Amino acid sequence: MYPKKTGIVGVIITVVILIILVFVSNLNLENLSYLENIVSTVVMPVQNGLTYLKNKITGNQTFFADINNLQKENEELKNKNAELEKTLREFEMVKSENTTLKEYLNLTESYSQYQTKPAYIIDKDFSNYNNVFVINIGEKDGIKPNMTVISEKGLVGYVISTTHSTSKVQTIIDTASTVSTTLSSSKDNLICKGTLEERGVLKATYIPTTATLVPGDKIETSGMGGIYEKGIYIGTVKKVIATKNIADRYAIIEPAVDFNKVDTVLVITK
């Protein structure tokens, strides 16, 4: 019991002494310089501790103020970033429109001998058997079945059906497609069809036994068959497959058009 009380009394006495010492240390006691030195020596650590504590508290306040400023700056940066993203999207749209207009211009210049209608591809159905797509012009634009469809690179296909505002186009790499073609160099006639064996290419058959085909030879439409105009570029010979009977040999034709990337075309209306 006594030791506990003694400890409490000791703490109280220590606190009182410290308070007195702080008070005395702040007095201007010119005549008690020796005492002042003693008091300063004892009190200085206490004052330093109080100053440190004050600085800590002030620093925390500054820290919280900085946090608020950072939050405001963060919100401002988010808003600016959103504005920049919006501007970038608008720029990309303008760039895309300009690219499309340039493609149309190149197409019309390349096929100036024909009367054409430009179109966007709005849907694609590319599977193992089908290679068709839908364009955004139709009967209201004067589009009819069997009209030839081309791109800047070359022959794409032909219109197989129409609605009031759209048309379905069968590409030359569709397995149901057949194109009468000619070797640009020798003018030998070939028949090119879509093939299941190798996607995205044409298979050239009925090659005359006297015809000489080598990789790189250019292929174009012959004008026969009643659908395609004569002289439209198709692609190049990729490889020639020899057989026991020369009459059965065939060639693989690499189309000039990349059907996975094409998105603007022209329909030859006349």
Image: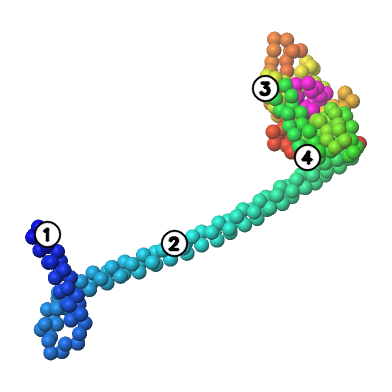
Q: Secondary structure at mark 3?
A: loop
Q: Earlier in the sequence, mark 4 or mark 1?
A: 1
Asked if disc 2 and disc 3 are in contact, CB closer than 8 Å, the reply is no
User: Residue 173 magenta-drawn?
Assistant: yes
The residue labelled by disc 4 is 120
Task: Classify 10 Å Cα crowding around label 2: few (below 14), some (14-19), many (20 and above).
Answer: few
Q: Is residue 99 something one can see in this rendering?
A: yes
User: Which residue bears the numbered disc 3?
Assistant: 198
Amino acid of disc 2: Ile
Q: Which residue is mark 1?
A: 4
Q: Residues within 10 Å of mark 3 (few under 14, many from 20)?
A: few
Q: CA distance from mark 4 to mark 3?
A: 27 Å
Residues in magenta, as a range:
170-184
What residue lies at 90% left-to-right and 38% top-to-bottom?
140
Report how far apart the C-alphas of labels 4 and 1 lie in the structure.
95 Å
Residue type at the position of mark 1: Lys
Distance CA(mark 4)–CA(mark 2): 52 Å
Which numbered mark, 4 or 1, is in the foreground of this view? Answer: 1
Q: Position of residue 105 (x, y in %)?
A: 80, 46
Q: Nearer the viewer, residue 13 or 268?
A: 13
Viewer-nearest of discs 4 and 3: 4
**x and y percent of residue 259 in the render?**
72, 32
